[in-house]
Image: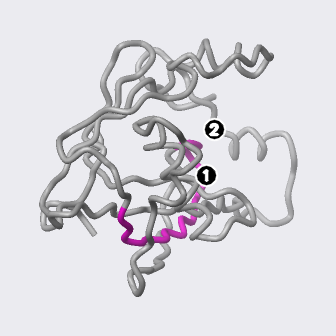
């Protein structure tokens, strides 16, 4: 039994787990997710936001958010910042090898806050989001609005595995559209 989203039924893992396994403690587990948000600051003081995404099925998802990425286990916020910028913006540069040299995390801008709410990915499961934020500059980005492509759509991915074939059936992000906006228009 899941929640209906359009014609697609979404599983409710906690409810399914509870039906199949009696527990002495009826408190559901809490999904913990660490997320890094990078406010990329341009030379003119504007902030880079992802305005929208083009999905593999042709639909568009509105975003208007600074660059952000889920952190990997054991990854530090600084490591996540460099990985996120390379993954999301690296395709704009001729060579991704020097992207790390283009990035500068601005001292004194790190902050962390925790939010607790229901998981968007797993309806019915409580989630704790540790939100790590920093400001950074990335040398060489276009001054105008621009677009980046996910690797599997720019011809770089040649891997043929069960996982990549399964992803081929899922709706994924194909392109990211970026724009520079006034810092006051970006939510904290």
Residue 79 versus residue 14 in the image, above or below? below
Residue for point 85% across, 40% down: 20
Splitting the image into 4 quarters, where does residue 11 fall? top right
> Would you say 85 lies left or right of 62 here?
right
Magenta region, residue range: 121-137
**Above or below: residue 59 compared with residue 181:** above
The structure residue drawn at horizontal position 48% and vertical position 42%, both measured from the top left corner, is: 90
- Residue 182 spot, x, y in % from top left: 12, 61
Residue 98 position in % (x across, y down): 54, 51
Distance from Cα at disc 2 to Cα at disc 1: 8 Å
Circle 2 is placed at which residue position?
12
In the rendered image of this protein, does residue 165 appear above or below residue 23?
A: above
Q: Main secondary structure of the magenta part?
A: strand
Q: Is residue 97 magenta?
A: no
Asked if the magenta segment contains residue 134, the reply would be: yes
Q: Residue at x 54, y 70 (%)?
A: 130
Instruction: Give coordinates of residue 178: x percent, y percent.
Output: 28, 41
Relative horizontal placement of residue 63, taking residue 100 as reference (left or right)? left
Q: Identify the secondary structure beneath mark 1.
A: loop
In the drawing, what numbered circle is on residue 58?
none
Of helix, strand and loop, which one carries label 2? loop
Q: Residues within 10 Å of mark 2 (few under 14, many from 20)?
A: some
Circle 2/circle 1 CB separation < 8 Å = yes
Q: Could you say which quadrant of the image residue 43 lies in?
A: bottom left
Measured as percent of width and height from the top left, residue 166 is found at: 70, 16
**Quarter of the image with the C terminus in it:** bottom left
Circle 1 is placed at which residue position?
A: 125
Task: Point out the tag, 2 or 1, that comes first from the N-terminus.
Answer: 2
Which residue is depicted at the point 27% across and 53% down? Answer: 48
């Amino acid at each position: 039994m899941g929640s209906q989203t359009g014609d697609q039924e979404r599983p409710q893992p906690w409810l399914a787990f509870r039906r199949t396994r009696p527990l002495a403690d009826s408190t559901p587990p809490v999904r913990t997710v660490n997320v890094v948000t990078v406010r990329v600051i341009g030379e003119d003081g504007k902030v880079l936001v992802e305005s929208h995404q083009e999905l593999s099925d042709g639909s568009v998802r509105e975003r208007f958010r600074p660059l952000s990425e889920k952190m990997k286990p054991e990854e530090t916020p600084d490591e996540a910042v460099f990985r996120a910028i390379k993954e999301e913006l690296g395709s704009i540069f001729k060579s991704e090898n020097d992207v790390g040299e283009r990035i500068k995390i601005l001292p004194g801008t790190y902050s962390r806050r925790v939010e607790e709410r229901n998981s968007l990915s797993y309806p019915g499961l409580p989630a704790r989001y540790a939100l790590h934020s920093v400001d950074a500059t990335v040398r060489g980005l276009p001054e105008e609005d621009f677009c980046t492509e996910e690797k599997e759509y720019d011809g770089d991915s040649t891997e043929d595995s069960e996982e990549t074939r399964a992803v081929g059936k899922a709706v994924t992000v194909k392109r990211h559209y970026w724009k520079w906006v006034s810092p006051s228009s970006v939510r904290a």
